[in-house]
Image (cartoon, grey):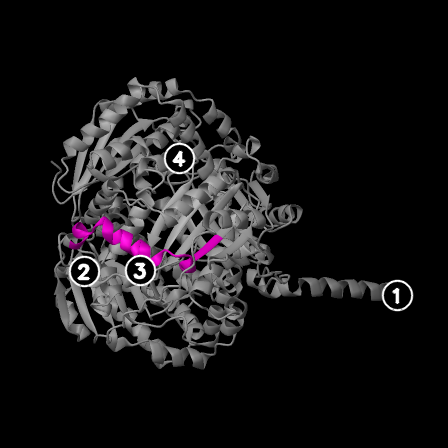
Amino acid sequence: MLRNFLIVSLLLGLQLASSAAAQTLVEKVQEHRLENGLTLLLVERHASPTVAAYISFKVGGVDESSQHRGVAHLLEHMLFKGTKTLGTVDYQQEQPLLAEIEEIGQQIDDLKNRPDRDEQELQQLREKLADLQKQHRQLVVKDEFSKIYAENGGVGYNAFTSKDQTTYLINLPANKLELWAAIEADRLQNAVLREFYTEREVVREERRRSYESNPNGKLYETLLATAYQVHPYRNPIIGWDSDIENLTLAETRTFLRNYYSPANMIISLVGDFDSAAALALIKRYFGPLEPGVPVPPVAKKEPAQQGERRVHVNFDAQPQLAIAYHKPTMPHRDDYVFDLLMQVLTEGRTSRLYRALVIDKQLVTSVNAYGAPGSRYDNLMMLSLAPRQDAPVGEIEAALYAELERLKTEPVSAAELEKAKRQILTSSLRRMKGNSGLARMLSSYEVLGGWRYLVDYEEQLNSIRAEELMDVAKRYFTAANRTVASIGREALQ
Amino acid sequence: MRVRLFLTLILIFLAGCGPLVATGPVRPDQLQFPPLEFNFPQVEKHQLTNGIRVFLKEDHELPLVDLSVLVAGGDIHDSQQQTGLSSLFAQVLESGGTLAASPAELEAELEAMAANLSVSSSSYSYEIGLSLHQRDLTRGLEILADLLRQPGFDQQRLELAKRKMVEAIRRKNDDPESIAGRLLAKAVYQQHPFGRYPEIAAVESFSREQLLRLHERDFRPANLWFAVSGAVSQAELLALLQEKLGDWQAEEPLVLELSALPPPPAGRVLSADKQIPQTTILLGHPGINKDNPDMFALRVANYILGGGGFNSRMMREVRSNRGLAYSVYSYFQIGRRLPELFIAGSETKAESTLEVVQLMRGLIQQLIDQPVSDAELELAKQSLINSFVFAFTDTHSIVSRKLRLDYFDYPVQYLETYRQKIAAVTVADVQRVARTYLKPDQLQIVLVGDSAEYADDLPQLALPVERVELRDDEGS
């Protein structure tokens, strides 16, 4: 799991001459829990007068029911639309219009999917909605959060929704920390989900851009929907197109009310501030929030895969190939072993698959391995390959599987294992440089069960022996546990 | 006495509550903030006796050292027949070993150290990056010196890099955004190096001798700029550099001519077909370079037009008000030497292609025709000024920025005066630069998508329409 992320614990091992300075960084992570359940992680860093501020909720695409696919992501968009005081000329005046827009919008949604719909009626309703939206626009102060943050020097004001979590982030000059607290606390207590039907269309455009017009996105989405049959990791975070265009304001509001509360909330601040003052600020602004209830765990379990699955997508692009194996997620011991296996397989030019498939056999131009699509539940080891022109897919697969077989029968050498461990630990150090990267990392791991996972990581990694790699390879690299997806103008030969 | 005290208390109470009663809670933008303390980080500059320049900033937070070497040269000097040679050169410099170590030996050693080596080529330079653990610095610098002075350009790795490049050419039509970017560059720059893309036959003909000649031409001490940051002391670094590179004999710095840009073509539509449900739209025409004093006013103007994210007019009109796109933006590529492009782009479903093109053109025209509001100007300026501090958050980018400012001969006080120059921009300046540098009649309008959905609408643009056929093997 930790590949590509920071290992704080590395700094505890003092083989590194100057890790003392870095070690103090670990000691600097201050963890607080407010009375209402909110988790706060603080790291003071005074190198530049800036702060990275992250708010994460332990809720994402995986927590949606099949009736509400895409709602976590749509809500994330809607939370940029303002509050009762921001983004509006006068909320009192706006309210009846918002209610009317919702009423007409819902009528359109109810009507549009009916086979016996009256097209003329539908058209009239749409015109009415457009007219109401036009009136409403007179009362909107466009994107006011964004405006206030920008004029105060904020950068990277954004949010992202993943399978496991939803995160809102910004970087601000250090003297503007209270501005962030005030805006975010207002957003959590007084959000107004205005301009909903327009934003739904924006999300449909986002889907066309990232999946329907993009071969990588399309292949990834197809692979997940094939490798998983039961668990919601199979669903695209953004939703399918017909999901998005039928999501309702009521569902979106319910999702906000159910999950965006301190019980599911983590704030990470990294940068130039005084911790005591920051803690007091957070208590003042976020302390009054109602605790809420934790997001319930996903009950659906993916049954063991009982046979290879294969799928192809016809798409106007050169071929690509993706192969996935089911695996357990962190903190299962096997997950640490997979971190090493993926490193040995594809990291760098001396890695096994790069050497065999790119340099020696020249069947593909690139090969990458990574864990996906999330980490709160059992996930996949994915391999992405870009075949060379006319390289027979059968040969590519055969060469790839031969390397996986070799992992089952020959232990990796001590040097190879050592290299993999060192690479993981050093690349993690590199990720620690920026405030934003560190805040993101702390937030992400806190969502997944606690940032202290990072503290034990190096010890776990270093305790893994070559035989365990063989054992894990034997148990998971089987044809029955495999899904093979391809994309291109015609089915691959 | 008592009465007076009582009254006073009431007055204080009312005074304290007054604003709350009148306007509700304090709006976040009405909070007061302490001033920001910011000092420009210092970067050490040195020069070795043979002319190599070294920029350094120590940073001992983590046990890592980052080195970048800029070497004068780059893509712009590739001749027509050699388009792609500099890029291949960079790839084989990275992967082809040195005279002291075979590619496999070098890779094994670097990977055992968990070091990252990368080489790239851009318009005016090559850049070599090496990220190391502090403990491996001496050996790392030795490898870097070997790469600079006696690269291997291993024949087999050359062949492999050529084949990868050919594969990349075959994949050039997979992604609509890169297709549109290529068509725009070709349309504006024509035969100029900025408009050229490598072709399969040329790449297949490239030889090791050509790489060696390029190395001999460009790699010399006076052409080298080092940027170093991380856990290393100045004295140690300079001693190491002197040891590994000090005996490299000085030669005159190389001066290469830059090909002149062609005259701008007249406005037209370039339409390429791809079976996808969304059209990628890219508008562009020639722009400015960094020596243009209007650069600051233009930054402000572009922020308002399409550079300010959600605070820009394009985002407001195309995305937020109409739901027609997820992404819509504009920017001036500020050329380091030659002027580069003004670009505006978006993606929208095939049916709304023309609507979005018209909206974007309309907003460009509006910025020319009408003065911006004071509020828009103020927001753009405040945003650019107050976010300036983020240019100095990462130690290595602080050092490499200093290096680039030096290499490209920026004015001495460029960074120090940046905020004042933005602050001085007026509403009249914005309109003046919009009139001077936005040229709606020169816009090349590139559309990549399912043109059957919008071909009938295109005559409304009143521009010549050229269809471009996309072929993976050759041409466009």
Crowdedness of circle 4 by 10 Å Cα count: few (<14), some, many (20+)?
some
State if disc 4 and disc 1 touch (CB < 8 Å). Answer: no
Q: Nearer the viewer, mark 1 or mark 4?
A: 4
Dot 3 or dot 2: first in sequence order is 2
Check disc 4 and give the amino acid type: Glu
Tell me which corner region of the image, top left, top right, bottom left or bottom right, holds residue A13.
top right
Helix, strand or loop: magenta stretch = helix
Q: Secondary structure at mark 4?
A: helix
| Mark 1 to mark 4 CA distance (whole Å) | 88 Å
Dot 1 or dot 4: first in sequence order is 1
Out of B186 and A175, give the one closest to the viewer: B186
Check disc 3 and give the amino acid type: Gly
Q: Are marks 4 and 3 on the same chain?
A: yes
Crowdedness of circle 3 by 10 Å Cα count: few (<14), some, many (20+)?
many
Rendered image: mark on residue B1: 1
| Mark 2 to mark 4 CA distance (whole Å) | 37 Å
Is residue B224 in view from this perspective? Answer: yes
Residue holding disc 3: B323
Check disc 1 and give the amino acid type: Met
Q: Picture coordinates of residue B349 (x, y %)? A: 23, 58
Dot 4 or dot 3: first in sequence order is 4
Q: Secondary structure at mark 3?
A: loop
Residue holding disc 2: B81
Disc 2 is attached to a residue of which chain?
Answer: B
| Mark 3 to mark 2 CA distance (whole Å) | 45 Å
Residue holding disc 4: B109
Apparent side of residue A97 relative to residue B23 in the rendered image (left or right) = left
Check disc 2 and give the amino acid type: Gln
